[in-house]
Image (cartoon, grey):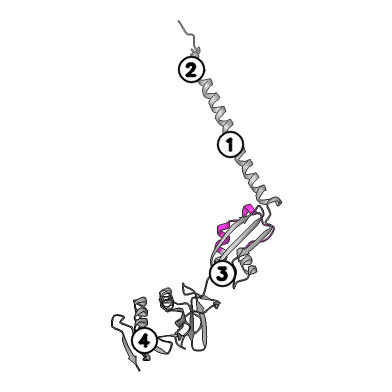
Amino acid sequence: MSLTSGEVIRSPRIADRRRAVRLQQRSRRRRLVIAFALVVAAGAGAVLLTRSEVFQLDSIAVVGTRTVTDDTVREASGLAPGQNLLSIDLGAVEARVEELPAVLEARVTRDGSLGIVIEIAEREAVLGVRAGERRWFVDAEGRVVPAPDSGVPVVDVGGDVAGPVTLDAAVVDGVVTLWRALPKRLRGRMSPIGTAPGGDLSFSVAGTAVRFGTLTHVKAKVHAFLRVRRRVLHAGDDLDAVDVSSPRRPAASIS
């Protein structure tokens, strides 16, 4: 076959392929447009929901308060009636409430469709601290907290302490362990625990002066004191003083 100038041979197969490619491109563009429209619609819907009066916060309940007031917890939460429930970050609310000095832990949950419940656990005093005429209380972490409802051991840190300060958590734990190892009948007859350079502790229990030493082997030292006291009292004598700083070799002063 001869071709004249400018004449082009078109293959039916190539033409079909080109039409298929154009159809695929149009279909792909159509899907992208639809997907974009759905995203925009979803975003607009979310904005409308977070601004809708249908989901306004109606009630804020507080549970577990003892020394801190419900209003203080509500204020710290940053919540207020009328806020949209869908825009509230419960974890952020918990973090804000836990910044209150008296609060150990907070848990925030939704109550029905329009309410929020803030449940807190307050820090509890486990140890009293005395410095001259000043006295305050600390929790298990050594933080200053309100006075407890019932008795706790007391540590005398001397009169040169400026005021309420935190204590090392290990010291708090050791003193509380000492106190709890004593029989309940003796806890109320225990004097404030004196401290000396080097960490040695001393106190009296039911009229007996006790040199305790440092806060090591706490339970062994308490058991040594109780064992010596029981033997001396059983013999009909008075236990004036006892040194349990070395619990395996306690020394006693008897009259």
Earlier sequence position, callout 2 versus callout 4: 2
- Which residue is at a point 60% across and 41% down the rendered structure image? 39
Q: Are marks 4 and 3 in contact (CB under 8 Å)?
A: no
**Which mark, residue 100?**
3
Relative placement, left or right, of 139 versus 117 is: left
User: Label 3 to label 2, Cα distance in Å?
Assistant: 76 Å
Identify which residue, 119 or 41, lies in the foreground.
119
User: In this figure, which residue is indicated by the disc labeled 2?
Assistant: 14
- The image shows residue 117 at horizontal and vertical percentages of 62, 60
- Which residue is at a point 48% across and 15% down the rendered structure image? 13
- Looking at the picture, which amino acid does disc 2 mark? Ile
Q: Residues within 10 Å of mark 2 (few under 14, many from 20)?
A: few
**Which mark, residue 35?**
1
User: Label 2 to label 4, Cα distance in Å?
Assistant: 114 Å
Earlier sequence position, callout 1 versus callout 3: 1
Earlier sequence position, callout 4 versus callout 1: 1
- Looking at the picture, which amino acid does disc 3 mark? Leu
Secondary structure found at label 1: helix
- The image shows residue 148 at horizontal and vertical percentages of 54, 77
Earlier sequence position, callout 4 versus callout 3: 3
Identify which residue, 6 or 118, lies in the foreground.
118
- Which residue is at a point 39% across and 89% down the rendered structure image? 209
Secondary structure found at label 2: helix
User: In this figure, which residue is indicated by the disc labeled 4?
Assistant: 234
